[in-house]
Image (tube, grey):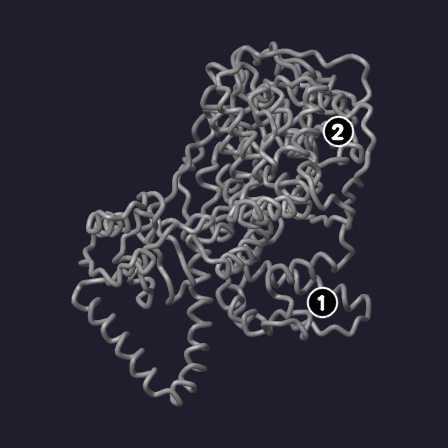
Amino acid sequence: MVNGSLPTNLQIINCLSAQHNSFIHAVIAELYLYGNKYNLKPSTYVRTGHYCVQSRPKNAQEKPPYRRCNSQDSLDELAMDDYWKEIEIIQHSREGEVETQEELQLKVPDEGEQEEAWLTEAGLATLFDESASDPEDSMVLLSTLTRTQAAAVEKRVETLKQTLRKRNRPHHVPDVRDIFKQPTVEGEQVGAPQTSRSTWSSELHKSIRSCLCIRLGRLPSETVLNLEVSFSEQALNSRQLLKGSAAPSEADDKLPSFRFSQDRTGMTKVGDLAPEDMKKVRRLALIEMTALFDTVGIELKTHKALKLKVKESGLFGVPLVTLLEQDQRRLPGTKVPLLLQRLICHIEDEGLDTEGLLRIPGVATRVKVVCQELETKFYEGLFPWESLKQHDAASVMKLFIRELPHPLLTVEYLSAFISVLKLPTKKQQLQALNLLVLLLPESSRDTLKSLVEFFQRVIDHKEQNKMTLNNVAVVMAPNFMFKGFRSKITEQEEFAMATGTANILRLLIRYRNLLWTIPKFIMNQVRKQNAENQRKLNRERAMRKLLKKMAYDREKSDKTEKYSDIAQGFIRVQAPQFLKVSMAVQLTDDLQASDVLTRFLSQDTSLTVRREDVCLYEIGGNIKERCLDEETYMKALLELNPSAEWVIKSIQR
């Protein structure tokens, strides 16, 4: 097949298609991706069986043929018809509009600029700018890095050093050997890029071989996610197993059902940590994501958005942060725009069994009127929700998403999200998405989570509304491609971006319960940083305590009592918010955070608080503050953080 001519290969594919549909669709996707190298048009390989993969010209007069496949199991089977139909709806909705807002313009960073930005975002600006703040914190961060993470930092520092040398700039960039005193193991090339595949035929052959191996069950099961070992370290250890293979496209019901390995110290979700620790998590996630892509030989190119004038008030076309500030003045603590929350509630109240929900558009003229009315009446509570039709509400929701001046997945990381699909295994794709979710700004991350949870609730009614995971992903994909972007890319680039965005949305929805989790290895690195910073702080406090003997003795007495309780097999739990001074709880191997909460709520029947509204918090020691997973084993966590205090209070979310 590799050495044969293209028509011969297609004849073979057509002969096999009747019995091997899902496998052939993966082959067709490969043909499309690599066909551009040989100036092949999509129409060259249009049909296999009764499915069609075709590109829709932007300015074509006829509407694309709209077909609904009998089996809606893969993106290839859908043929992206829903995508092109959604594009036509969007274009039609904008007819006659006067563009008043600037389109977002992208800028590719200059040589060296990307490395500077990366090091700054990672909290390592002191490596190229001695005037930057927190030099000691940078050293603490570097001391916690894994082998592959250190290699990622070394690569950026060395590249920046070479760039500055070319420019003859006076900046001092330390030698990488001075940054990391312990060199990597001799003969081991950490993060070395893979050898590029030479020809289109060999690339196709390897992809087909990968598909066959997976279908024949020759690859190991990838259902368990290990969160204790760095993802990039895992990739380095398994790099040879699947070297050069491409990740195939699976049907909805073929996507692996991943689960986490059990962690007795409890899982940590986004929102469980104090802002100070989340800042550390974000820096580590950036370094780890870069290390993961380096390890598998994928180069990431970041973009930055040029400054543009945006609306400073209103509901549509307003930056997400600005909109949330408006909402928080009316309802403190709001993390997802109130308008989006209300639209989702309205769609659900009308019933999720409606066929074609999210796919069938509302009436364009009505949608425009609705948007105008919302702008003037929403905050006053005067908008007539009872008259809003369900499909119109769904169209308003999609318009809200695509009119954001900055995309939800952010300009900076949009290309990284799409590059996730280049990773060779679904496990690595999921790991990379996990890190990217942690990198998103809080406003984007919380809003995205609200959306994917809503999309899943729509999919839960797929027997009635005919909206599968793939249907929803393809229909919503154009709305996640930021405004003005389509006019700046070629047709083939658009097709690649469309399928990529749809597949990323597909993974975000399918694995929504996993992706908003902070891996344990990152939590351990945060704890190490906090422990080192605490040691330095304690040394400073010791000097001050010499001048405050009474305060010192009192604190020492408190610590003595605390460790005495632990020695006797008890932990002391406080609940000052509920006027509970202290509660002694016997420490056993099986004691979980849920048991502590149960005992607390059962002891005071006068409390009106609901169980789901309170949490046991781990405070101090090597963590700032952490809301505990109810399945956390207290004895295991105490061994990890013996200096922590245990406090019950309302969940701060």
Left or right: where does residue 371 sit relative to residue 612? right
Within 10 Å of disc 2 (Cα), the crowding (few <14, some 14-19, many 20+) is some
Q: Give the image location of residue 386, x and y in percent.
A: 55, 21
Nearer the observer, 445 or 110? 445
State the residue position of label 1: 161
- Considering every residue shown, the one lying at the far bottom of the view is 547
Q: Is residue 393 visible?
A: yes
Task: Please identify the quadrant where the N terminus is shown.
Answer: top right
Task: Of the two numbered discs 2 and 1 on the same chain, state the one appearing first in sequence.
Answer: 1
Left/right of residue 81 with respect to residue 486 in the rendered view: left
| Residue 608: mark in rendering | none
Q: Amino acid at mark 2?
A: Gln
Q: Amino acid at mark 1?
A: Lys
Task: Inspect this view and state whether residue 9 appears.
Answer: no
Location of residue 316 by image quarter: top right
Q: Position of residue 496 (x, y in %)?
A: 69, 31
Quadrant assignment, res 164: bottom right
Q: Nearer the viewer, residue 526 or 17?
A: 526
Height in image: 545 above or below 201?
below
| Residue 492, label in figure | 2
Relative to 299, is 295 on the left or the right?
Answer: left
* Label 2: element kind: helix
Is 457 rendered above or below residue 8?
below
